[in-house]
Image (cartoon, rainbow, N blue to C red):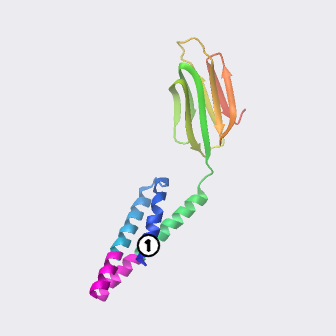
Amino acid sequence: MWVVALLVGVALIPFLPGFPSPAFTIALVVGVVAALIAAVIDIRSRRRGASPRLIGWGRGLAIFALIIDLVLVITLILGVLTRPHLTLVELRATGGPVFTVSFSDDVQQHVDEEWHDSGFARFNTAKSSTEITVKTPDDQTPQTVTCEIEWNGEVVAHETSTSGTVTCRYPAG
């Protein structure tokens, strides 16, 4: 029983980076440690003819580890099924030698972020639209600036302007 608990716990380790919640990590560590202690108790009790009480503790810990593993597996399955559809977005811009860009992703808004010559931002989003504005500083003469939006690997917007400011939107409108 402890073997299954330990194998399932170890198999769940690669999923840790996908869960920002420390509760998943703590539960996984507790489950693996419980399975390891159950393994030690089981192996020692076989060699020494241990008391039934100690054997019961080992089985109890193995069952506890299996329950934790089951809860974590169900959490993973529900997380995959209920996760919003994410889109990979890449925003590109050229201008310069220095220019600013403004855009937002699902986490924060980037306002007047300074880029040099060319730059890009890549993020996943649950939104169905995005926008980027590129502009040269007010104290410089207007230069040619471009912006481009790539949505799930497909270029969906590309704009160029000689006025020093350009905006790309997806969907267009």
Between residue 110 and residue 38, name the one nearer to us: 38
Q: Quadrant of residue 99?
A: top right
Question: What amino acid type should be assigned to the residue bearing mark 1?
Answer: Ala
Residue 114 on the magenta segment: no
Looking at the rendered image, the quarter that the N terminus falls into is bottom left
Residue 68 in sight in this render: no
* Residue occupying image coordinates x 57% and y 44%: 124
Image position, residue 159 (x, y; %): 68, 26
* Residue occupying image coordinates x 45% and y 55%: 21
Image position, residue 96 (x, y; %): 55, 19
Residue 73 in sight in this render: yes
Image position, residue 93 (x, y; %): 59, 27
Q: Is residue 160 above or below residue 151?
A: above
* Residue occupying image coordinates x 45% and y 70%: 7
Residue 48 on the magenta segment: yes
Element marked by disc 1: helix
Q: Is residue 52 above or below residue 74?
A: below
Q: Is residue 148 above or below residue 13?
A: above
Looking at the rendered image, the quarter that the C terminus falls into is top right
Image position, residue 109 (x, y; %): 53, 35
Going by the picture, which residue comes out furthest to the right?
Answer: 173
Label the magenta part by its dominant secondary structure. Answer: helix
> Which portion, as a residue range, is magenta?
39-62
Q: Which residue is mark 1?
A: 5
